[in-house]
Amino acid sequence: MIKIIPAIDIMGGKVVRLLQGDASKVTVYSLSPVEMAQNWASYGIEMLHIVDLDGAFGGELKNLEVISEIAKSVDAKVELGGGIRNEAAIEKALRAGIDKVVIGTKALDSKFLKEAGKRFGEHIVVGIDAKSGMVCTKGWVEKTEIKAVDLIKEIERCGIKTVNYTDISRDGMLCGPNIASLRELLSKTSLEVVASGGVSNIDDIKRLKALEKEGLAGIIIGKALYENAIDLGEAVLICSQKG
């Protein structure tokens, strides 16, 4: 069964969405991340995907207090990314009640990744943010010369089990997911892959659900929920069906 995972991006203690990861193009959707989390969790979802945007840009966790409050207030598990660049940050997040920690920028450090995978096991998820198939880091502002398909092979060697794959060019644009890119990635790995970026309507959910047979494990939905383009209950129902 494919998991539907609502995204909550936090900046300055508020629930926001950035256009294409641009910190200057912010839309505020709620002043209470906790209330938003409780709303999404009421649909019976298994996990929330939370991003500390201040942390992503600053290199260290900035909104952990409110994120910890979220973890304590919902039955869903909480996955956190943004500003997690060392093992101390991972420990801090896990102590705060976070179930899974997403490593993005530091995933390019294979030594760090191996040590984190060995020490924290299934609590570690790697976030691959890519544009035109190339990995981007530091809140999407730096494009590397590393191919996403090459990075995923390195992740496998480090013993990590789950990858969140975001197509930056689609994220927040409500233009549909990059199915071709996802298919290519799925064909090259046995890891649990969660898709993110571009989901805009229920038809997109159905198209991604069809990739379950190819190994897709989950779908992160952000802007489409906040713009009421997708009914979360309907999305959960579609993805819970055997297909």
Image (tube, rainbow, N blue to C red):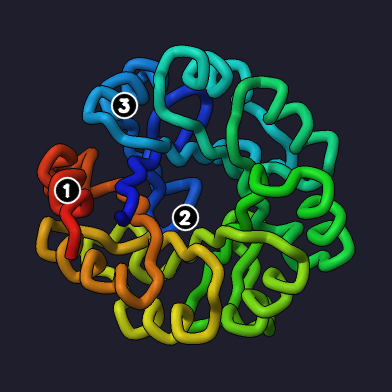
Answer yes or no: is residue 57 visible. Answer: no
**In which quadrant will I find the N terminus?**
bottom left
Q: Residue at x 60, y 40 (%)?
A: 100
Q: Residue at x 69, y 29 (%)?
A: 94
Earlier in the chain: of badge 3 and badge 2, it is 2
Position above or below: 157 against 70? below
- In the rendered image, which residue does mark 3 sit on? 41
Mark number for residue 21? 2
- In the rendered image, which residue does mark 1 sit on? 235
Do the CB atoms of the residues marked 2 and 1 lie less than 8 Å apart? no
Q: What residue type is labelled 1?
A: Ala
Judged by depth in the image, the label closer to the viewer, 3 or 2, is 3
- The 10 Å Cα crowd at callout 1, few under 14, some 14 to 19, many 20 or more, is many
Residue 108 sits in which quadrant?
bottom right
Tell me the CA gap for discs 1 and 3: 14 Å
Do the CB atoms of the residues marked 3 and 2 lie less than 8 Å apart? no
Tell me the CA gap for discs 2 and 1: 25 Å
